[in-house]
Amino acid sequence: MPNESSWGADYFYNFLHEFKTFEKISKQKFRVLVIGSSVTGYSINPKDLEEELRKVTGKDLDIIFLSYAGMPPMDAYLMREQFLSLSPDLVVYPVNFVDWRLYRAYVLDPKNGKNETAEESKLILDALDFRDAPQSKIIFPWESLLEFWDLIGLEKSAEYLAASIFGSYRYKEIYWKISSSLYEHRFGRNTSFREYNGVDIPEKVTFRGWTGKVFSFQPKPYMTHKGFYIQVVEEVLKDGKLILNLENSSHSVQQTMEFTSPGWKKILLDPRFLEQEEKDNWIRVELSNTWIPYFAGPEHKDWARDVLGVRLQQIFGKEDDLSLLDRRPVREERLEDLRYLGMSDKEYEEYFYFRLLTDLKKRPGLQYIQVLADSKKKIAKEKFRPILHFRYMKKLISFFKEKDLPFLLINNPENPVSLSWYGDSEWYREHLSYLGEISGGGDNFVDLGRALPSTDFWDFHHLTYAGTQKMNSKYAALISKFVE
Protein backbone atom coordinates (compact mmCIF):
# COMPACT_ATOMS: atom_id res chain seq x y z
CA MET A 1 0.00 0.00 0.00
CA PRO A 2 1.34 3.50 -0.77
CA ASN A 3 2.59 5.47 2.19
CA GLU A 4 0.51 8.64 2.20
CA SER A 5 1.07 9.30 5.89
CA SER A 6 2.27 12.59 7.25
CA TRP A 7 5.50 12.80 9.23
CA GLY A 8 4.11 12.49 12.74
CA ALA A 9 1.07 10.29 12.08
CA ASP A 10 0.85 6.51 11.67
CA TYR A 11 4.38 6.07 12.98
CA PHE A 12 4.23 2.27 13.12
CA TYR A 13 3.27 2.18 9.45
CA ASN A 14 5.99 4.70 8.62
CA PHE A 15 8.49 2.51 10.49
CA LEU A 16 7.41 -0.67 8.67
CA HIS A 17 7.28 1.08 5.29
CA GLU A 18 10.81 2.43 5.71
CA PHE A 19 12.09 -0.98 6.76
CA LYS A 20 10.39 -2.81 3.85
CA THR A 21 11.64 -0.19 1.38
CA PHE A 22 15.31 -0.60 2.27
CA GLU A 23 14.98 -4.35 2.74
CA LYS A 24 14.33 -4.57 -1.01
CA ILE A 25 17.15 -2.22 -2.05
CA SER A 26 20.62 -3.68 -2.50
CA LYS A 27 23.25 -1.60 -0.74
CA GLN A 28 25.25 0.68 -3.01
CA LYS A 29 26.44 3.31 -0.50
CA PHE A 30 27.65 3.59 3.07
CA ARG A 31 24.53 2.96 5.16
CA VAL A 32 23.76 4.78 8.38
CA LEU A 33 20.93 3.22 10.36
CA VAL A 34 19.34 5.74 12.75
CA ILE A 35 17.02 4.20 15.34
CA GLY A 36 15.08 5.48 18.32
CA SER A 37 11.91 6.91 19.77
CA SER A 38 10.24 10.26 19.11
CA VAL A 39 13.42 11.75 20.62
CA THR A 40 15.12 10.61 17.41
CA GLY A 41 12.11 11.48 15.27
CA TYR A 42 12.12 15.11 16.40
CA SER A 43 15.90 15.46 16.19
CA ILE A 44 16.93 14.19 12.75
CA ASN A 45 15.65 14.84 9.25
CA PRO A 46 17.14 12.07 7.07
CA LYS A 47 17.35 14.11 3.84
CA ASP A 48 18.94 17.09 5.59
CA LEU A 49 21.43 14.79 7.30
CA GLU A 50 22.31 13.15 3.98
CA GLU A 51 22.99 16.58 2.47
CA GLU A 52 25.09 17.69 5.44
CA LEU A 53 27.12 14.47 5.35
CA ARG A 54 27.71 14.98 1.63
CA LYS A 55 29.23 18.39 2.44
CA VAL A 56 31.35 17.02 5.29
CA THR A 57 32.56 13.76 3.73
CA GLY A 58 32.21 14.40 0.01
CA LYS A 59 30.32 11.13 -0.27
CA ASP A 60 26.73 10.05 -0.88
CA LEU A 61 25.34 8.08 2.05
CA ASP A 62 22.06 6.34 2.73
CA ILE A 63 20.27 7.32 5.93
CA ILE A 64 17.79 4.65 7.01
CA PHE A 65 15.50 6.17 9.61
CA LEU A 66 13.63 3.69 11.81
CA SER A 67 11.84 5.54 14.57
CA TYR A 68 8.51 5.40 16.32
CA ALA A 69 7.14 7.06 19.44
CA GLY A 70 7.99 5.12 22.56
CA MET A 71 10.81 2.89 21.26
CA PRO A 72 12.94 1.97 24.31
CA PRO A 73 16.20 -0.04 24.18
CA MET A 74 14.35 -3.28 24.95
CA ASP A 75 12.39 -2.86 21.71
CA ALA A 76 15.57 -2.08 19.79
CA TYR A 77 17.22 -5.22 21.16
CA LEU A 78 14.28 -7.37 20.10
CA MET A 79 14.62 -5.93 16.57
CA ARG A 80 18.39 -6.42 16.40
CA GLU A 81 18.26 -9.11 13.68
CA GLN A 82 15.90 -6.99 11.59
CA PHE A 83 18.30 -4.07 11.87
CA LEU A 84 21.22 -6.29 10.93
CA SER A 85 19.37 -7.57 7.85
CA LEU A 86 19.56 -4.07 6.36
CA SER A 87 23.37 -4.32 6.23
CA PRO A 88 24.16 -1.02 7.95
CA ASP A 89 27.72 0.25 8.25
CA LEU A 90 26.91 2.29 11.35
CA VAL A 91 24.05 2.31 13.87
CA VAL A 92 23.17 5.63 15.53
CA TYR A 93 20.92 5.74 18.59
CA PRO A 94 20.04 9.11 20.21
CA VAL A 95 18.48 8.67 23.67
CA ASN A 96 17.07 10.79 26.46
CA PHE A 97 15.64 10.27 29.94
CA VAL A 98 12.21 9.31 28.61
CA ASP A 99 13.66 6.35 26.67
CA TRP A 100 14.67 4.56 29.87
CA ARG A 101 11.02 4.55 31.03
CA LEU A 102 12.13 5.15 34.61
CA TYR A 103 8.89 6.95 35.38
CA ARG A 104 7.00 3.65 35.20
CA ALA A 105 8.40 2.54 38.58
CA TYR A 106 6.67 5.52 40.18
CA VAL A 107 3.44 5.00 38.24
CA LEU A 108 3.18 1.33 39.20
CA ASP A 109 3.83 2.13 42.87
CA PRO A 110 2.99 5.81 43.48
CA LYS A 111 3.64 5.60 47.21
CA ASN A 112 6.88 3.64 47.53
CA GLY A 113 8.12 3.13 43.96
CA LYS A 114 11.85 3.54 43.33
CA ASN A 115 14.09 2.47 40.49
CA GLU A 116 16.62 1.42 43.13
CA THR A 117 14.30 -1.33 44.33
CA ALA A 118 11.82 -1.89 41.46
CA GLU A 119 11.12 -5.48 40.44
CA GLU A 120 12.30 -5.83 36.85
CA SER A 121 9.77 -8.52 35.90
CA LYS A 122 6.91 -6.14 36.69
CA LEU A 123 8.52 -3.43 34.58
CA ILE A 124 8.91 -5.86 31.67
CA LEU A 125 5.24 -6.87 31.81
CA ASP A 126 4.33 -3.20 31.94
CA ALA A 127 6.52 -2.50 28.90
CA LEU A 128 4.69 -5.25 26.97
CA ASP A 129 1.20 -3.92 27.74
CA PHE A 130 -0.60 -3.72 24.37
CA ARG A 131 -2.60 -0.67 25.44
CA ASP A 132 0.54 1.41 25.96
CA ALA A 133 2.95 -0.42 23.65
CA PRO A 134 1.26 -2.34 20.80
CA GLN A 135 4.52 -2.46 18.84
CA SER A 136 5.55 -5.78 20.41
CA LYS A 137 2.58 -7.40 18.65
CA ILE A 138 2.81 -5.36 15.43
CA ILE A 139 6.54 -5.24 14.74
CA PHE A 140 8.33 -8.01 16.67
CA PRO A 141 5.83 -10.55 18.06
CA TRP A 142 7.99 -13.64 17.49
CA GLU A 143 11.02 -12.06 19.12
CA SER A 144 8.89 -10.99 22.10
CA LEU A 145 7.58 -14.53 22.48
CA LEU A 146 11.06 -16.06 22.39
CA GLU A 147 12.44 -13.56 24.89
CA PHE A 148 9.62 -13.52 27.43
CA TRP A 149 7.60 -16.76 27.03
CA ASP A 150 8.31 -17.80 30.62
CA LEU A 151 7.11 -14.46 31.99
CA ILE A 152 4.05 -13.41 29.97
CA GLY A 153 1.76 -16.37 30.48
CA LEU A 154 -0.18 -18.63 28.12
CA GLU A 155 -2.80 -16.14 26.88
CA LYS A 156 -0.31 -13.46 25.85
CA SER A 157 2.01 -16.08 24.39
CA ALA A 158 -0.88 -17.23 22.19
CA GLU A 159 -1.45 -13.65 21.01
CA TYR A 160 2.21 -13.27 20.06
CA LEU A 161 2.16 -16.60 18.27
CA ALA A 162 -0.98 -15.65 16.34
CA ALA A 163 0.56 -12.31 15.37
CA SER A 164 3.70 -14.12 14.20
CA ILE A 165 1.72 -16.47 11.94
CA PHE A 166 -1.20 -14.37 10.70
CA GLY A 167 -0.53 -10.98 9.13
CA SER A 168 -4.26 -10.27 9.17
CA TYR A 169 -4.15 -10.33 12.97
CA ARG A 170 -0.76 -8.67 13.31
CA TYR A 171 -1.45 -5.68 11.08
CA LYS A 172 -5.21 -5.28 11.43
CA GLU A 173 -5.13 -1.91 13.24
CA ILE A 174 -2.62 -0.48 10.76
CA TYR A 175 -4.48 -1.88 7.75
CA TRP A 176 -7.83 -0.29 8.55
CA LYS A 177 -6.26 3.00 9.55
CA ILE A 178 -4.24 3.28 6.33
CA SER A 179 -7.12 2.01 4.18
CA SER A 180 -9.49 4.62 5.57
CA SER A 181 -6.85 7.28 4.96
CA LEU A 182 -6.42 6.22 1.33
CA TYR A 183 -10.19 6.17 0.85
CA GLU A 184 -10.48 9.66 2.32
CA HIS A 185 -7.73 10.96 0.00
CA ARG A 186 -9.46 9.63 -3.11
CA PHE A 187 -13.16 9.83 -2.37
CA GLY A 188 -13.61 11.96 0.75
CA ARG A 189 -13.36 15.64 1.57
CA ASN A 190 -10.08 15.19 3.47
CA THR A 191 -11.55 17.04 6.42
CA SER A 192 -11.05 14.23 8.94
CA PHE A 193 -7.43 13.89 9.95
CA ARG A 194 -4.88 14.01 12.71
CA GLU A 195 -2.10 15.89 10.97
CA TYR A 196 -1.77 18.22 7.97
CA ASN A 197 -0.07 16.68 4.92
CA GLY A 198 -0.74 19.27 2.24
CA VAL A 199 1.52 21.65 0.35
CA ASP A 200 3.94 23.86 2.25
CA ILE A 201 2.42 27.19 3.23
CA PRO A 202 5.10 29.94 3.31
CA GLU A 203 3.59 31.51 6.44
CA LYS A 204 3.26 27.98 7.91
CA VAL A 205 0.30 26.16 9.42
CA THR A 206 0.00 24.17 12.64
CA PHE A 207 0.41 20.41 12.70
CA ARG A 208 -3.37 20.17 12.55
CA GLY A 209 -3.62 22.51 9.58
CA TRP A 210 -4.60 25.83 11.17
CA THR A 211 -3.40 28.96 9.38
CA GLY A 212 -2.58 32.34 10.84
CA LYS A 213 -4.22 35.63 9.86
CA VAL A 214 -2.46 35.51 6.48
CA PHE A 215 -1.51 32.52 4.34
CA SER A 216 -0.42 31.95 0.74
CA PHE A 217 -0.66 29.11 -1.76
CA GLN A 218 -0.35 28.37 -5.45
CA PRO A 219 -3.68 27.75 -7.20
CA LYS A 220 -4.34 24.30 -8.68
CA PRO A 221 -6.81 23.50 -11.49
CA TYR A 222 -9.00 21.33 -9.24
CA MET A 223 -9.64 24.32 -6.98
CA THR A 224 -11.70 26.05 -9.68
CA HIS A 225 -14.10 23.19 -10.53
CA LYS A 226 -13.96 20.76 -7.61
CA GLY A 227 -13.08 23.37 -5.02
CA PHE A 228 -11.48 22.94 -1.60
CA TYR A 229 -12.64 23.18 2.01
CA ILE A 230 -11.64 25.32 4.96
CA GLN A 231 -12.88 24.96 8.51
CA VAL A 232 -14.42 27.99 10.21
CA VAL A 233 -14.79 27.71 14.00
CA GLU A 234 -17.24 29.62 16.13
CA GLU A 235 -14.36 31.33 17.98
CA VAL A 236 -13.29 33.18 14.83
CA LEU A 237 -16.84 34.49 14.46
CA LYS A 238 -17.07 36.00 17.94
CA ASP A 239 -16.55 39.54 16.62
CA GLY A 240 -18.84 39.08 13.63
CA LYS A 241 -18.67 37.52 10.20
CA LEU A 242 -15.39 36.19 8.82
CA ILE A 243 -14.19 37.81 5.59
CA LEU A 244 -11.56 36.19 3.37
CA ASN A 245 -9.79 38.44 0.88
CA LEU A 246 -7.90 36.55 -1.85
CA GLU A 247 -5.49 38.33 -4.19
CA ASN A 248 -2.92 37.15 -6.72
CA SER A 249 0.73 38.22 -6.90
CA SER A 250 0.16 40.90 -9.54
CA HIS A 251 -2.90 42.30 -7.70
CA SER A 252 -4.92 41.86 -10.89
CA VAL A 253 -7.36 39.25 -9.55
CA GLN A 254 -9.28 39.50 -6.30
CA GLN A 255 -11.97 37.38 -4.66
CA THR A 256 -13.85 38.02 -1.43
CA MET A 257 -15.85 35.55 0.65
CA GLU A 258 -17.91 35.94 3.79
CA PHE A 259 -18.90 33.35 6.40
CA THR A 260 -21.36 33.76 9.24
CA SER A 261 -21.59 30.21 10.62
CA PRO A 262 -19.04 27.58 11.73
CA GLY A 263 -18.22 24.37 9.85
CA TRP A 264 -16.31 23.16 6.81
CA LYS A 265 -16.90 25.60 3.95
CA LYS A 266 -16.42 24.86 0.27
CA ILE A 267 -14.52 27.41 -1.79
CA LEU A 268 -14.58 27.52 -5.58
CA LEU A 269 -11.60 29.52 -6.77
CA ASP A 270 -12.07 32.17 -9.44
CA PRO A 271 -10.65 30.64 -12.71
CA ARG A 272 -8.81 33.90 -13.42
CA PHE A 273 -6.32 32.95 -10.69
CA LEU A 274 -4.93 30.26 -13.03
CA GLU A 275 -4.06 32.63 -15.89
CA GLN A 276 -0.50 33.45 -14.72
CA GLU A 277 2.48 31.11 -15.04
CA GLU A 278 2.44 28.63 -12.18
CA LYS A 279 5.88 29.41 -10.73
CA ASP A 280 4.95 33.07 -10.20
CA ASN A 281 1.33 32.49 -9.39
CA TRP A 282 0.65 32.85 -5.69
CA ILE A 283 -2.58 33.71 -3.94
CA ARG A 284 -2.43 35.66 -0.70
CA VAL A 285 -5.34 35.19 1.69
CA GLU A 286 -6.00 37.62 4.53
CA LEU A 287 -8.63 36.98 7.20
CA SER A 288 -10.66 39.66 8.93
CA ASN A 289 -10.74 37.78 12.26
CA THR A 290 -8.52 35.42 14.25
CA TRP A 291 -8.82 33.40 17.45
CA ILE A 292 -6.55 32.10 20.24
CA PRO A 293 -6.85 28.48 21.47
CA TYR A 294 -6.52 29.34 25.16
CA PHE A 295 -9.70 31.41 25.01
CA ALA A 296 -11.63 28.89 22.89
CA GLY A 297 -14.54 26.70 23.89
CA PRO A 298 -14.10 23.07 25.04
CA GLU A 299 -13.81 21.60 21.52
CA HIS A 300 -10.85 23.77 20.49
CA LYS A 301 -9.42 24.71 23.90
CA ASP A 302 -5.66 24.42 24.21
CA TRP A 303 -3.07 25.99 26.48
CA ALA A 304 -1.45 27.93 23.65
CA ARG A 305 -1.38 31.60 22.68
CA ASP A 306 -0.99 31.11 18.95
CA VAL A 307 -3.08 33.45 16.78
CA LEU A 308 -5.01 31.21 14.39
CA GLY A 309 -7.33 31.61 11.41
CA VAL A 310 -8.97 28.77 9.47
CA ARG A 311 -8.13 25.11 9.01
CA LEU A 312 -7.06 23.65 5.66
CA GLN A 313 -7.88 20.17 4.38
CA GLN A 314 -5.40 17.40 5.17
CA ILE A 315 -3.89 17.18 1.66
CA PHE A 316 -4.62 20.76 0.59
CA GLY A 317 -2.97 21.55 -2.75
CA LYS A 318 -2.22 17.90 -3.58
CA GLU A 319 -5.62 16.51 -4.49
CA ASP A 320 -4.95 16.61 -8.24
CA ASP A 321 -1.65 14.71 -7.89
CA LEU A 322 -1.80 12.08 -5.15
CA SER A 323 1.61 10.73 -6.18
CA LEU A 324 3.02 13.66 -4.19
CA LEU A 325 1.84 11.90 -1.04
CA ASP A 326 3.60 8.58 -1.64
CA ARG A 327 7.01 9.47 -0.26
CA ARG A 328 9.17 9.06 2.80
CA PRO A 329 7.54 11.18 5.52
CA VAL A 330 9.49 14.40 5.98
CA ARG A 331 9.21 16.79 8.89
CA GLU A 332 8.20 20.29 7.82
CA GLU A 333 8.25 23.50 9.82
CA ARG A 334 4.96 24.30 11.54
CA LEU A 335 3.56 27.29 13.41
CA GLU A 336 4.21 25.54 16.73
CA ASP A 337 7.92 25.54 15.85
CA LEU A 338 7.88 29.32 15.65
CA ARG A 339 6.15 30.21 18.92
CA TYR A 340 9.35 30.47 21.00
CA LEU A 341 11.55 32.34 18.51
CA GLY A 342 12.92 35.56 19.94
CA MET A 343 11.86 34.82 23.53
CA SER A 344 14.19 35.47 26.46
CA ASP A 345 14.91 32.59 28.86
CA LYS A 346 12.48 34.12 31.35
CA GLU A 347 9.71 34.48 28.78
CA TYR A 348 10.25 30.94 27.56
CA GLU A 349 10.17 29.45 31.05
CA GLU A 350 6.87 31.21 31.81
CA TYR A 351 5.35 29.85 28.58
CA PHE A 352 6.87 26.42 29.26
CA TYR A 353 5.05 26.03 32.56
CA PHE A 354 1.87 27.54 31.14
CA ARG A 355 1.92 25.25 28.10
CA LEU A 356 2.87 21.99 29.80
CA LEU A 357 2.29 22.08 33.55
CA THR A 358 -0.71 24.34 34.15
CA ASP A 359 -4.30 23.20 34.94
CA LEU A 360 -3.43 19.54 34.44
CA LYS A 361 -6.62 18.41 36.21
CA LYS A 362 -8.49 19.85 33.24
CA ARG A 363 -6.10 18.19 30.78
CA PRO A 364 -5.99 14.44 31.44
CA GLY A 365 -4.01 13.87 28.26
CA LEU A 366 -1.04 15.72 29.77
CA GLN A 367 -0.85 13.93 33.10
CA TYR A 368 2.00 11.93 31.59
CA ILE A 369 4.00 15.17 31.37
CA GLN A 370 3.54 15.79 35.10
CA VAL A 371 4.53 12.20 35.87
CA LEU A 372 7.68 12.63 33.78
CA ALA A 373 8.52 15.90 35.54
CA ASP A 374 8.00 14.36 38.98
CA SER A 375 10.12 11.31 38.07
CA LYS A 376 13.11 13.50 37.16
CA LYS A 377 12.93 15.19 40.54
CA LYS A 378 12.62 11.82 42.33
CA ILE A 379 15.44 10.12 40.42
CA ALA A 380 17.78 12.93 41.48
CA LYS A 381 17.58 11.56 45.02
CA GLU A 382 18.26 7.93 44.06
CA LYS A 383 21.40 5.98 43.33
CA PHE A 384 21.92 4.87 39.76
CA ARG A 385 20.90 1.29 39.00
CA PRO A 386 21.20 -0.04 35.42
CA ILE A 387 17.79 -1.66 35.36
CA LEU A 388 15.83 -3.08 32.40
CA HIS A 389 16.34 -0.73 29.45
CA PHE A 390 19.89 0.12 30.52
CA ARG A 391 20.57 -3.61 30.61
CA TYR A 392 19.03 -4.10 27.17
CA MET A 393 21.03 -1.21 25.76
CA LYS A 394 24.16 -3.01 26.96
CA LYS A 395 22.99 -6.24 25.31
CA LEU A 396 22.19 -4.38 22.07
CA ILE A 397 25.62 -2.77 21.91
CA SER A 398 27.32 -6.10 22.71
CA PHE A 399 25.39 -7.76 19.89
CA PHE A 400 26.60 -5.23 17.33
CA LYS A 401 30.14 -5.41 18.68
CA GLU A 402 30.10 -9.16 18.06
CA LYS A 403 29.10 -8.40 14.45
CA ASP A 404 31.90 -5.80 14.12
CA LEU A 405 29.27 -3.15 13.45
CA PRO A 406 30.10 0.34 14.82
CA PHE A 407 27.52 1.83 17.17
CA LEU A 408 27.17 5.52 18.03
CA LEU A 409 25.22 6.21 21.24
CA ILE A 410 24.17 9.82 21.80
CA ASN A 411 22.84 11.35 24.98
CA ASN A 412 20.58 13.75 23.13
CA PRO A 413 19.95 17.39 24.07
CA GLU A 414 17.50 18.13 26.86
CA ASN A 415 15.60 21.29 27.69
CA PRO A 416 17.67 23.26 30.26
CA VAL A 417 14.46 23.88 32.24
CA SER A 418 13.79 20.17 32.86
CA LEU A 419 17.50 19.26 32.99
CA SER A 420 17.87 21.61 35.98
CA TRP A 421 15.62 19.28 38.01
CA TYR A 422 18.16 16.43 37.99
CA GLY A 423 21.13 17.31 35.76
CA ASP A 424 23.51 18.03 38.66
CA SER A 425 22.64 14.87 40.58
CA GLU A 426 24.88 11.92 41.27
CA TRP A 427 22.38 9.74 39.42
CA TYR A 428 22.76 11.79 36.22
CA ARG A 429 26.56 11.70 36.35
CA GLU A 430 26.62 7.95 36.99
CA HIS A 431 24.16 7.22 34.20
CA LEU A 432 26.39 9.08 31.73
CA SER A 433 29.40 7.17 33.01
CA TYR A 434 27.54 3.89 32.49
CA LEU A 435 26.59 4.80 28.91
CA GLY A 436 30.18 5.66 28.14
CA GLU A 437 31.35 2.38 29.65
CA ILE A 438 28.97 0.05 27.78
CA SER A 439 29.51 1.83 24.45
CA GLY A 440 33.28 1.61 24.69
CA GLY A 441 33.81 5.35 25.01
CA GLY A 442 35.82 7.32 22.48
CA ASP A 443 33.82 8.21 19.39
CA ASN A 444 31.17 5.62 20.29
CA PHE A 445 29.49 7.77 22.93
CA VAL A 446 28.88 11.49 23.11
CA ASP A 447 27.00 13.61 25.61
CA LEU A 448 25.06 16.40 23.90
CA GLY A 449 22.66 16.89 26.80
CA ARG A 450 23.43 20.59 27.16
CA ALA A 451 23.91 21.41 23.47
CA LEU A 452 20.86 23.64 22.92
CA PRO A 453 19.07 26.54 24.63
CA SER A 454 15.54 26.11 25.95
CA THR A 455 13.94 27.95 23.02
CA ASP A 456 14.87 25.04 20.74
CA PHE A 457 12.55 22.63 22.59
CA TRP A 458 8.84 21.89 22.35
CA ASP A 459 8.85 20.27 25.78
CA PHE A 460 11.43 18.34 27.83
CA HIS A 461 13.20 16.54 24.99
CA HIS A 462 11.47 17.12 21.62
CA LEU A 463 13.26 19.66 19.43
CA THR A 464 11.62 22.41 17.44
CA TYR A 465 12.36 22.58 13.72
CA ALA A 466 15.03 25.23 14.39
CA GLY A 467 16.58 22.96 17.01
CA THR A 468 16.70 20.10 14.51
CA GLN A 469 18.47 22.32 11.99
CA LYS A 470 21.06 23.36 14.58
CA MET A 471 21.75 19.74 15.48
CA ASN A 472 22.17 18.63 11.87
CA SER A 473 25.82 19.69 11.61
CA LYS A 474 26.61 18.20 15.04
CA TYR A 475 25.21 14.79 14.08
CA ALA A 476 27.01 14.92 10.75
CA ALA A 477 30.35 15.69 12.42
CA LEU A 478 29.95 12.69 14.74
CA ILE A 479 28.88 10.30 11.98
CA SER A 480 31.60 11.46 9.58
CA LYS A 481 34.28 10.03 11.91
CA PHE A 482 32.97 6.55 11.14
CA VAL A 483 32.59 7.24 7.42
CA GLU A 484 36.22 8.31 7.11
Image (cartoon, rainbow, N blue to C red):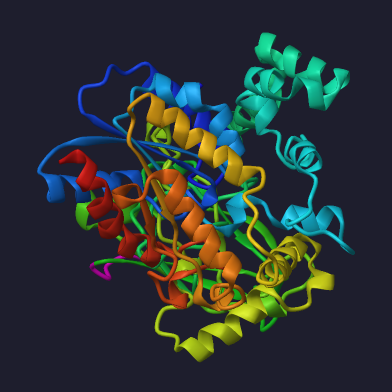
**What residue appears at the point 31 percent right and 18 percent down from the top-left corner?**
25
Which part of the image, by quadrant, shows the C terminus?
Answer: top left
Which image quadrant is residue 451 in?
bottom left
| x and y, in percent, of residue 143 in the image | 63, 21
Residue 54 in sight from this viewpoint: yes
Q: In the picture provided, is 184 more to the left or to the right than 283?
A: right
Does the magenta stretch mainly form a helix, a strand or a loop?
Answer: loop
**What residue appears at the point 51 percent right and 71 percent down from the top-left corner?**
415
Residue at the extreme right: 111
Q: In the picture provided, is 353 more to the left or to the right than 445?
A: right
Image height of 297 relative to 168, above or below: below
**What residue appears at the point 39 percent right and 71 percent down from the top-left corner?**
452
Magenta residues span 250-254
Image height of 429 relative to 241, above or below: above
Image height of 291 relative to 48, above or below: below
| Viewer-proximal residue among 254 and 263 | 263
| Viewer-proximal residue among 13 and 196 | 13
| x and y, in percent, of residue 2 in the image | 47, 25
Which image quadrant is residue 135 in?
top right
